[in-house]
Amino acid sequence: MPRTTCPAVNKRLRSLGYPDLRLRGGRGYQYFTYSDGARFEDRSEMVYRVSDLTVDEWVERALDFARDLGVTPAGATLATRSES
């Protein structure tokens, strides 16, 4: 299994269509940032080392953050309900 690193997680996020969502490292914690040029948001994750979780686990946390922000993958559109 490849070693979990911020660049590996960020590469996976880009491949899923989230180029503005990034995992970054702090001292004893990690955090996600979202910045599309018009909006900046962040979320801390109390995980001591990036390698304490797998890339897939980090991606799931990142996608939770994106859903909370209402962010969709690049090129995707939000489904709209028709009001009848």
Image (cartoon, rainbow, N blue to C red):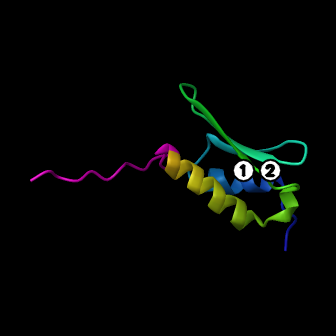
Residue 36: image location, x then y, percent: 57, 32
Q: Nearer the viewer, residue 51 or 15?
A: 51
Check residue 26 for magenta coloring: no
Q: Nearer the viewer, residue 18 or 57?
A: 57
Q: Is residue 7 left or right of residue 43?
A: right
Q: Which residue is mark 1?
A: 10
Give the distance between the C-alpha atoms of the residues marked 1 and 2, in whole angstroms: 5 Å
What secondary structure is marked by label 1?
Answer: helix
What's the residue at 74%, 45% (across, down)?
Answer: 31
Instruction: Give above or below for 52 relative to 48.
Output: below
Instruction: Give above or below for 56 relative to 21.
Output: below
| Magenta range | 69-84
Check residue 70 for magenta coloring: yes
Q: Is residue 50 left or right of residue 72?
A: right
> Mainly helix, strand or loop, the magenta region?
loop
Q: Which residue is mark 2?
A: 7
Answer with the quarter of the image where residue 55 lies.
bottom right
Q: Residues within 10 Å of mark 2 (few under 14, many from 20)?
A: few
Residue 72: image location, x then y, percent: 47, 49
Q: Nearer the viewer, residue 40 or 4?
A: 40
Q: Residues within 10 Å of mark 1 (few under 14, many from 20)?
A: many
